[in-house]
């Protein structure tokens, strides 16, 4: 299995057979979007995915995930003090009070040097759950490691550093309307001490937000909710 990132590190030549398969896949996509009265495909999500792929921001990820297209996104984190990071978020998104209090908490830290990170968009169903897991189960690092070993070749899915939420909120400029993406991370307290995780969303009216959602250890997570984990080369 190979994780193919859409960067300049690797180039491909499309063969005639691949060109035919791409054409067939494109025709099926068009059929589902245009020829049916209704479709499970969200047109805005399709547009964002295709645009991201052509811009080198999204890439297909292959693994033991039932052949589903898995979205991966490269971002830059670190190198920005927390107070400055908060102002950068404010410049491009509205911020829920919970999210702001999380960023101001002493447990929220940022890396001194900038580094690249790859995010992978997964649901609890993708991770093998058949019933709504508790937050502790869903974010359990040992289980993530076991799942990675069983499903990925030389890569591991893990929790994100907390600063991924604000950095992603800044860099994800073309988020589709109605999309909500949660950040898999170690929970941070809000202003009254309740555990929260970040989420990045765009309302149907187009307004962009960075939020913080209550992540009680015993609370149940939906099977279909979209969550961003960090994808890292296994050591």
Image (spheres, helix red, strand yellow):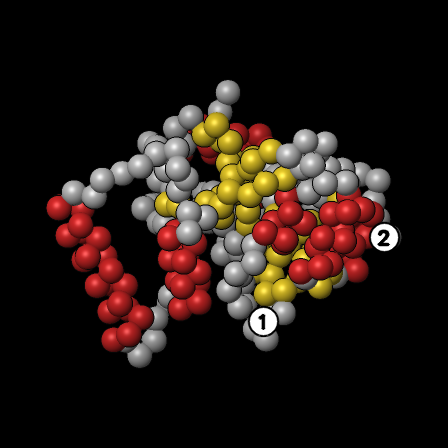
Question: Residue 177's x, y, as percent?
Answer: 53, 68
Residue at 37% x, 66% y is: 41
Asked whether 49 or 183 is in front, the reply is 49
Q: Residue furthest left?
A: 16
Q: Which residue is mark 2?
A: 191
In front of the other: 111 or 143? 111
Q: Which mark is residue 52?
A: none
Rendered position, 94 above or below 75: below
Of 65 and 75, which appears nearest the observer?
75
Q: Quadrant of residue 92?
A: bottom right
Q: Name which residue lies at 73% across and 47% down.
A: 85
Q: Is residue 149 visible?
A: yes
Per the image, label 1 sits on a secondary structure element best described as loop
- Can residue 58 be seen here? The reply is no
Residue 168: x %, y % from top left: 61, 49
- Label 2: few (<14), some or many (≥20) within 10 Å? some
Q: Position of residue 20 (x, y in %)?
A: 15, 52
Quickly name the residue at label 1. 206
Secondary structure of the residue carrying tag 2 is: loop
Closer to the N terminus: mark 1 or mark 2? Answer: 2
Q: Name the foreground residue: 82 vs 190.
A: 82
Q: Residue at x 37, y 45 (%)?
A: 60
Question: In the image, 151: left or right of 137?
Answer: left
Instruction: Kindly identify the residue that appears in the image at 31 percent across and 70 percent down.
Output: 33
Image location (x, y in percent) of residue 32:
28, 68
Q: Residue furthest right?
A: 192
Q: Tell whether 76 sits left or right of 111.
A: left
């Amino acid at each position: 299995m190979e994780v193919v990132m859409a960067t300049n590190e690797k180039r491909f030549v499309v063969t005639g057979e691949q060109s035919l398969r791409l054409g067939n896949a494109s025709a099926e996509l068009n059929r589902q979007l245009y020829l049916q009265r209704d479709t499970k495909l969200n047109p805005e999500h399709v547009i964002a995915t295709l645009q991201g792929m052509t811009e080198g921001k999204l890439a297909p990820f292959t693994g033991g995930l039932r052949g589903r297209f898995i979205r991966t996104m490269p971002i830059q984190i670190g190198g920005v003090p927390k107070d400055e990071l908060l102002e950068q978020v404010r410049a491009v998104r509205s911020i829920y009070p919970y999210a702001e209090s999380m960023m101001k908490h002493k447990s929220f830290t940022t890396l001194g040097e900038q580094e690249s990170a790859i995010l992978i968009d997964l649901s609890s169903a993708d991770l093998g759950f058949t019933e709504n897991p508790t937050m502790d189960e869903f974010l359990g690092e040992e289980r993530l490691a076991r799942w990675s070993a069983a499903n990925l070749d030389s890569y591991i899915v893990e929790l994100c550093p907390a600063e991924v939420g604000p950095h992603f909120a800044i860099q994800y400029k073309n988020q589709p309307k109605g999309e909500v993406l949660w950040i898999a991370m170690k929970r941070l307290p809000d202003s009254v001490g309740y555990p929260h995780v970040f989420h990045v969303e765009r309302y149907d009216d187009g307004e962009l937000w960075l939020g913080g959602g209550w992540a009680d250890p015993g609370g149940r997570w939906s099977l279909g909710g979209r969550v961003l984990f960090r994808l890292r080369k296994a050591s």
